[in-house]
Image (cartoon, helix red, strand yellow):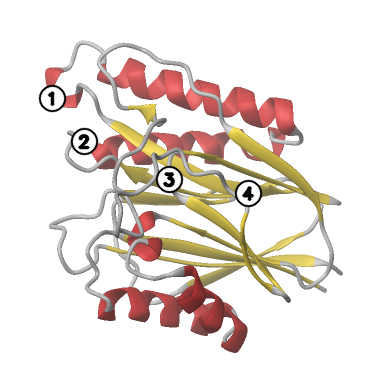
Amino acid sequence: MPYIAVTALSHVGLIREHNEDSLVVGPWTLCGTVTENPQTLVFPLGTPLVVAVADGLGGQPAGEVASALVARQLASFGPSLDGEAPLRDALDVCNQSVYAAAGGRPELATMGTTVAGAVVLAESLLTFNVGDSKVYEAARDGLRQVSVDDSPPPELGRRTTSAVTQTLGGRLEFEAVTAHVTASTLSMGDRYLICTDGLTDPLPDEVIDDLLRVHDDGRAAFELWKAAIEAGGPDNITLALVRLSE
C-alpha cells in the first residue's frame, strides 16, 4: 500500500536565543521548540496531507507567535486542502489571522512569518510558499527548487539575502498576499525537502544535493542539520523530508 513518510526536525541553531520556527505534519505541530533527533511519521496515501514550515520574522516581535498560529491553522484545515483553491483560501485565512492576532496589541505589532510546504494528494502534489522558506524536489538528476523566493536579488558578492518582499503578517496595516502554488504529478520514490532559511542560508544547494543523494530519511535530516551547524548555525533550522513509497 502506498504511504508517505515524513522525517522532520527543528533546532534553534548556534546563534539565536530561541526558536521562532514552527512545523506542521498532518495533525501534528511543533512550535518554537527543539527536537533532539529527527522524527519520522508515516501516513497512508489518499487523504490530503499538509507538511509545512513557518519561520517567524527576525528583528520583529513575536515571530514564534505568528509561525505557531500559521502552523496550527494549517493543521486544522488538514484534509480540506484538496485542491489549489482551498489551499489559497487557507493561506489567505492564515494571513488575516496573523494581522487579527496583532491588532490592538503593541507588543505583537508587525509580527509575521514566512510559510512553505506541500499538500500530498492521492495522485498529485501541491507545493506552496509565501516568503523565502523553500521547497525542493530531490530528483534523480539533481536538486530542484520548486518554491519561488519572495526576496530581492542578493547584493553583489553575496549568495543570500535576509530581505523578504511578501510574508504572512509583518506590517502595521493589512496587506493581502499572493501565494506561490504549483501542482505536479506524483510517482513512487519522489522526495521533497521543505525547510526554513536556517538550512539554506549557510548551505549551498550543491551541498544539500550531495547529502540527499547519499542519505535517506532520518540520516539525511541529521546530516543536513549537522552541516548547517558546522557552517555556523546562524539561524533556527527546521526541515521536513517527504518521501512517497510503497
Residue 146 position, x and y percent, is 62, 52
Q: CA distance from mark 2 to mark 1?
A: 8 Å
Residue at (39%, 39%) from the top-left corner?
152
Q: Name the N-terminal-most of marks 1 and 4.
A: 1
The residue that mark 3 highlights is 132
Q: Name the N-terminal-most of marks 2 and 4.
A: 2
Pointers 2 and 1 in contact (C-beta within 8 Å): yes
The residue that mark 2 highlights is 62
Q: Secondary structure at mark 2?
A: loop
Q: Name the N-terminal-most of marks 1 and 3.
A: 1
Residue 14 position, x and y percent, is 18, 69
Q: Type of residue at label 1?
A: Glu
The residue that mark 1 highlights is 107
Q: Type of residue at label 2?
A: Ala
Judged by depth in the image, the label closer to the viewer, 1 or 4, is 4
Pointers 3 and 2 in contact (C-beta within 8 Å): no
